[in-house]
Amino acid sequence: MTILKLYGSEKAACVRRVATVLYELKVPFELVEIDVMNGGHKTPEYLEKQPFGQVPYIEDNGFILYESRAICRYIAAKYPASGLIPSEPKANALFEQAASVELSNFDPSASKAGLEILKIELDWPYEQAVIDEQLPVLDKKLEAYNAILGKQRYVAGDTLTLADLFHLPYGPFVALGENDVMTRRPNVARWYSELISRPSWLAYVNGVKTTTVY
């Protein structure tokens, strides 16, 4: 059997997002480490597979796919019994709604603020102005999340979907900082705590690694 290959850095945010979903579905994979610190994602060989020079991409028995959310959707579609992408039309529509909310309302501010907060943790140069600008935006968005999660367990209903998992890893990056944005609203805190307690998230705390046995 040809094992799925995940190309990217073990510490990269979107690599971990994909690895978390692979773990959820117990899909064996090989991490092919790309040295992004030294431009490994900008070489001609890499750009042939990922023309934007970003990580990750996957190779699944010769099939090449990039963009972390697209990769996660592909994997979940191969294992439909998981329910991570609902098939019933109304449930699927609610999933698509929640996935769109994550991409348009959560990710823009969470990713910008989260990456700067992560730089603080790593003792790298960071931009406090970005944190100061983006955290209030995210905080306001989470008011709506709190209302949604007051009516249901997860963002698309009462069943876990990819839409929930897409919030990893930037939510936890934000929570590294000296703020309570992810925890001060009760419904968001309950949902967030459940996500970061999942074995799939905890498995790669120290970096994504090749996983063939679960």
Image (spheres, rainbow, N blue to C red):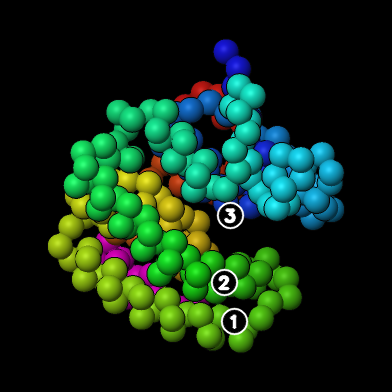
Residue 62 percent location from the top left of the image = 64, 24
For the view shown, which residue lies furthest in the left direction? 151
**Which amino acid type is shown beneath numbered disc 2?**
Lys
The stretch of residues the image draws in magenta is: 177-190
Residue 111 placement, left or right of 146: right
Residue 192 position by quadrant: bottom left
Q: Quadrant of the N terminus?
A: top right
Distance from disc 1 to disc 2, alpha carbons, whole Å, reads 7 Å
Residue 169 placement, left or right of 40: left
Q: Residue at x 66, y 49 (%)?
A: 55
Residue position marked by numbered label 1 in the rendering: 130
Lower position in the chain sequence, tag 1 or tag 2: 2
**Which amino acid type is shown beneath numbered disc 1?**
Val
Residue position marked by numbered label 2 in the rendering: 112
Lower position in the chain sequence, tag 1 or tag 3: 3
- Badge 2 marks a residue whose secondary structure is helix
Residue 10 in view here = no
Q: Residue at x 82, y 39 (%)?
A: 45
**Tags 1 and 3 touching, CB below 8 Å:** no
Residue position marked by numbered label 3 in the rendering: 13
Q: Nearer the viewer, residue 104 or 5?
A: 104
Mark 2 Cα-neighbour bin, 10 Å: few <14, some 14–19, many ≥20: some
